[in-house]
Amino acid sequence: MVEEAEDKRFTWLRQLLEWQRDLKDDAEFIESVKVDLFPHEVYVFTPKGAVKQFPLGASPVDFAYSIHSDVGNHCSGAKVNGKIVPLRYELRSGDTIEIMTSPNQKPSKDWLKFVKTARAKNEDPPVVYH
């Protein structure tokens, strides 16, 4: 079993070396590694550089609720990499997310159509969607 695990690691390392040799652009290499290593997850950054992990297809609303329930409940908009995006935007690995809030904003039933995380879907105490 130990030999089998080592064989898998060496195969993986050989694949990485092949990709690096074949892909001349470093950014393209990093992107291919991220996609192949973590196909069902995305890793994004807070404005201060902290890394957060989400399921594939997660949105800025998922991100907002991961920060704090009040941030999620009052999420009125989002910026991704400095540009305003719709709340249904699908996060991509490497994105930097900034959430805009408003004290008058309340959760919307429409959010349930695109949020992926349990925390965003089932806020405790339960969120009253309008």
Image (cartoon, grey):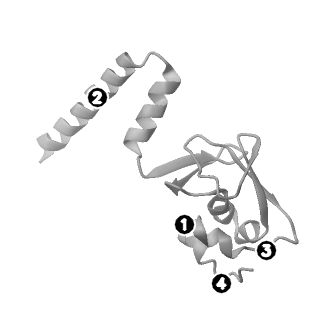
Q: Amino acid at mark 4?
A: Pro
Choose the circle earlier in sequence order: 4 or 1: 1
Reply above or below: 86 against 73: above
Q: Secondary structure at mark 3?
A: loop
Give the Cα separation between the discs numbered 2 and 3.
Answer: 48 Å
Label 4 environment density (alpha carbons within 10 Å; few <14, some 14–19, many ≥20) = few
Reply above or below: 21 against 76: above
Mark 2 highlights which residue? 15
Mark 3 highlights which residue? 106
Q: Amino acid at mark 1?
A: Thr
Choose the circle earlier in sequence order: 2 or 4: 2
Give the Cα separation between the discs numbered 2 and 4.
Answer: 46 Å
Give the Cα separation between the discs numbered 4 and 1.
Answer: 14 Å
Mark 4 highlights which residue? 126
Mark 1 highlights which residue? 117
Choose the circle earlier in sequence order: 2 or 3: 2
Look at 76% across and 71% down and name the residue there.
70
Look at 70% across and 71% down and name the residue there.
69
Q: Which mark is residue 79?
A: none
